[in-house]
């Protein structure tokens, strides 16, 4: 099974900061990676598919990059509504997908 | 608009069974594969199962294989998860999600608590 490891597990940042979250796959997955945002008590929401494609309606301050085993999610200028937990998810072994352990983004 | 509404969660004793449902609307349900994903309290997301658009193939996480069964009724636009031999570690919010490579729409989740 493909394992995904996110770093850091938690992160404190301020409004306006640039933030980067990393996701590393245990084997190459091409660009078959998505990023999700989850707020407390809510379902996850997909932000980015195919490693770098912004989903419709997602603000342009979110961006994704990478291929193979190393991927990043970047938020260019943190807004109050961005404080949440972020998950990467691989679909290279579709339909048996897997998720990273999550990165909790908190206000400094 | 796409809507997925889970139901059927509750408290169940270890070793017992429970079936949860996911009612779909706002899209052609029979045209999409569907996932179940769960989240234990305070924990991350765990993929549980997937079913093809026509129900012809199913896939399971090792943690539930042989105990859980995913199915669907395309006439009723409903997805199911039959959970047998439940364990304390199955306690979680269960989400259904539409498959498009990514999981592009999710329900609000239904809580299943396994406890004596």
Image (cartoon, coloured by chain):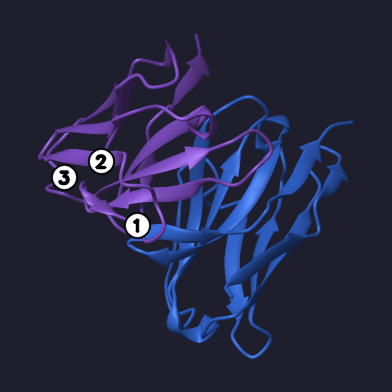
Chain colours: A purple, B blue
Dot 3, how many residues are within 10 Å of its Cα: few (below 14), some (14-19), or many (20+)? Answer: some
Give the structural element (helix, strand or loop) at label 2: strand
Q: Please, is residue A65 above or below residue B106 in the view?
A: above
Reading the image, the residue beneath label 2 is A63
Decide: is B82 above or below B17: below
- Whether residue A90 is situated above or below residue B76 in the rendered picture: above
In depth, the one of A104 and A100 nearer the eye is: A104
Q: Secondary structure at mark 1?
A: loop
Q: Secondary structure at mark 3?
A: loop
Q: Provide the residue designation for mark 1.
A: A55
What residue is at 50 percent from the left and 8 percent from the top? A108
Which of the two discs, 1 and 2, labels the residue nearer the N terminus? 1
Residue situated in front as seen by the camera: A37 or B69: A37
Q: Residues within 10 Å of mark 2 (few under 14, many from 20)?
A: many
Q: Earlier in the sequence, mark 1 or mark 3?
A: 3
Q: Label 3 belongs to which residue?
A: A29
- Number of numbered discs overlaid on the protein picture: 3
- Name the chain under label 3: A
Q: Are marks 3 and 2 on the same chain?
A: yes
């Amino acid at each position: 099974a493909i394992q995904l490891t996110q770093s850091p597990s938690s992160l404190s940042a301020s409004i306006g900061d640039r933030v980067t979250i990393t996701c590393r796959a245990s084997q190459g997955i091409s660009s078959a990676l998505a990023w999700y945002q989850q707020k407390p008590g809510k379902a996850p929401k997909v932000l980015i598919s195919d490693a770098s494609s912004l989903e419709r309606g997602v603000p342009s301050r979110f961006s994704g990059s990478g291929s193979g085993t190393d991927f990043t999610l970047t938020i260019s200028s943190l807004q109050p509504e961005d404080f949440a937990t972020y998950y990467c998810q691989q679909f290279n072994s579709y339909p048996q997908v897997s998720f990273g352990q999550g990165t909790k983004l908190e206000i400094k | 608009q796409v809507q997925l509404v889970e139901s059927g969660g509750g408290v169940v004793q270890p070793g017992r069974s429970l079936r949860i449902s996911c009612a779909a609307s706002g899209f052609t349900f029979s045209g999409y594969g569907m996932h179940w994903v769960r989240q234990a309290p305070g924990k991350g997301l765990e993929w549980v199962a997937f079913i093809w658009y026509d129900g012809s193939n199913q896939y399971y996480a090792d943690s539930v294989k042989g105990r859980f069964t995913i199915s669907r009724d395309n006439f009723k636009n409903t997805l199911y998860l039959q959970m047998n031999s439940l364990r304390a570690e199955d306690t979680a919010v269960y989400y259904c999600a539409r498959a498009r490579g990514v999981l592009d729409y999710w329900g609000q989740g239904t809580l299943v608590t396994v406890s004596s």
